[in-house]
Amino acid sequence: VRFKRLTHLPGNALQVICALMFTSYFFFWPAGVLTWLALSPWALNLFSWRVLWSFSALYTLQLVAHRPHLSRGWPYQWFLYSPMVDYILCYHDAMCIREGPPLDPEGRYLFAMYPHGVYGVCRAFSGGVGLWKTLFPGITGRWGSFGAAFMLPGIREFSLFAGCLDASKPILQKAVNRGENLKLLPGGIDEMNLTDGKSKETKLVMKDRKGFVKLAIENGLDVVPGFCFGEKYIHKTVKLPAFLRRVLRPLRLSGTMLRGRGPSFLGFLDPPLGFVWGEPVRIDRARAGEEGYLDEVHDQVVKRIQGIFDCHKARFGYDHEETLSIVSVADAKAALAGKPAKVD
């Protein structure tokens, strides 16, 4: 599926607005604070201080007491599978490929996306009308996200509208028990910190990160691997000092900052983004307790990702010097501390 960049005025405006919204939701909370001040007696005087502070108190109360990310989340299909996502892909002049025949809508799946990237723009390839409903008709799925996201105003609401739940195993297990499919970025914060647009090497934290495979085996979810080409090049990255990165990591916060077009997080227009969904790694649930089966399935997922990279990198503008390396969590932490990581 190809999403050509729109050049006419209405289309260009829509794709920029949608892409800006997607890359700016981390700034929703300061925008909310400014709106709060603008409505106050200090500015437009539309609401009294009592009304504004009462609203703030009620919002804070529900932030603590209302925890949908630990249960069923919010209705999300209207948002995640909407034209907004297609416009984001148009902004990036994107292309998405599905290898193999269509998936059975009655099947059960865990979609694993790589690499995480410094922002995770690859998540746009998990929704939309022209993309998802075309390549995976009849299939939906919920995202797993880091828990702190649901305590941050603006980020919380955007995440819930996008179908996110807390990424802890008990919560994801409940979602699977309800018959829902899952979408994950297994590389997580460690992979995000390894993003380097100046390097010809892409590092994936896969070597010993097997929890998602174990979850898939225990529940009979076929693993559908996917790889995003170009994301590491559409933002400039700025690494914080090593000691700050070490402090931020336990908080599940990235020590790698990003810079986009102008003062925004909008990605640069070159290169176009590409994504390939590979054929699923089929799971035999009857072998769930079999010794070595976890490693066998994990190895298949790694090989599928490597195969996608090798087969499609030229199509998406990667030259022959571009390589893919599989590293461990320990290697990623060593790199965070400024030490060289071992790679396969």
Image (cartoon, rainbow, N blue to C red):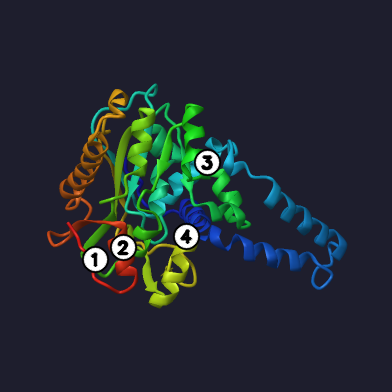
Residue 252: which disc?
A: 4
Amino acid residing under circle 2:
Ala
Q: At x 17% / y 53%, what residue is drawn?
A: 314
Q: CA distance from mark 2 to mark 3?
A: 29 Å
Quadrant of the image containing the N terminus: top left
Number of marks in picture: 4
Residue linked to disc 1: 341
Classify mark 3: helix, strand or loop.
loop
As rendered, which of 39 and 189 lies closer to the eye?
189
315 lies left or right of 27: left
Q: Is residue 123 above or below residue 278?
A: below
Q: Earlier in the sequence, mark 1 or mark 4?
A: 4
271 lies left or right of 40: left
Residue linked to disc 2: 332
Residue linked to disc 3: 163
Q: CA distance from mark 2 to mark 4?
A: 14 Å
Quadrant of the image containing the C terminus: bottom left
